[in-house]
Amino acid sequence: MSRSADKCLPFFKVLKRKMPLRWDEDIEGAFQELKEYLGQLPRMVSPKLKEALLLYRVMSDYAVSAVLVAERDQQQHLVYYLSHVMMGPKLRYLLVEKFVYALLIASPKLRPYFKSHHITVLIDQPLRSTLEKYGNSG
């Protein structure tokens, strides 16, 4: 789920072609892969009142994603998901810029959750040292 934009990218690229769209084997293959992937996505749940939530964010070369989950009975259940395909200059963002961008695009959509739940942002990067490095470079 966390890399769905990457999984959908081949189909998006086909649709963005400048030439007239003709349904061929490449398009059919990308479409079938997309249908199979979308058919396997987990069901979303509503968070319980004041339930603590976890926020994962994932960055790839082409997309940033955020996944909000609730942990119940030692299992994680999807609450909210968003993904954004990056194009143009955003493709050259540094890792720390992608992290901040993922939070930036997620914040407006997740505001209701931020206001009513304690949210832990899970990261796999040494964020403090990275931010201090870039913060002190000027």
Image (cartoon, grey):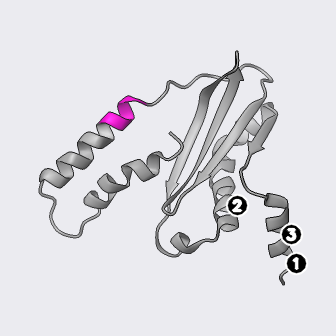
Amino acid type for the residue under numbered disc 2: Val
Q: Quadrant of residue 55?
A: top right
Other-residue count near label 3 (Cα within 10 Å), few / some / many at <14 / 14–19 / ≥20: few
Amino acid type for the residue under numbered disc 3: Glu
Image height of 4 relative to 44, above or below: below
Within the magenta stretch, is there residue 39?
Answer: yes
Element class at badge 3: helix
Q: Which mark is residue 136?
A: 1
Q: Which residue is mark 3?
A: 132
Residue 59 place in picture, x, y as percent: 58, 56
Q: Which residues are magenta?
A: 36-40
Whichever of callouts 3 and 2 sits on the residue coming sooner in the sequence is 2
Along the viewing direction, whichever of 105 and 60 lies nearer the viewer: 60
Residue 68 place in picture, x, y as percent: 65, 36
Within the magenta stretch, is there residue 53?
Answer: no
**Disc 2/disc 1 C-alpha distance (Å):** 17 Å
Q: Which mark is residue 100?
A: 2
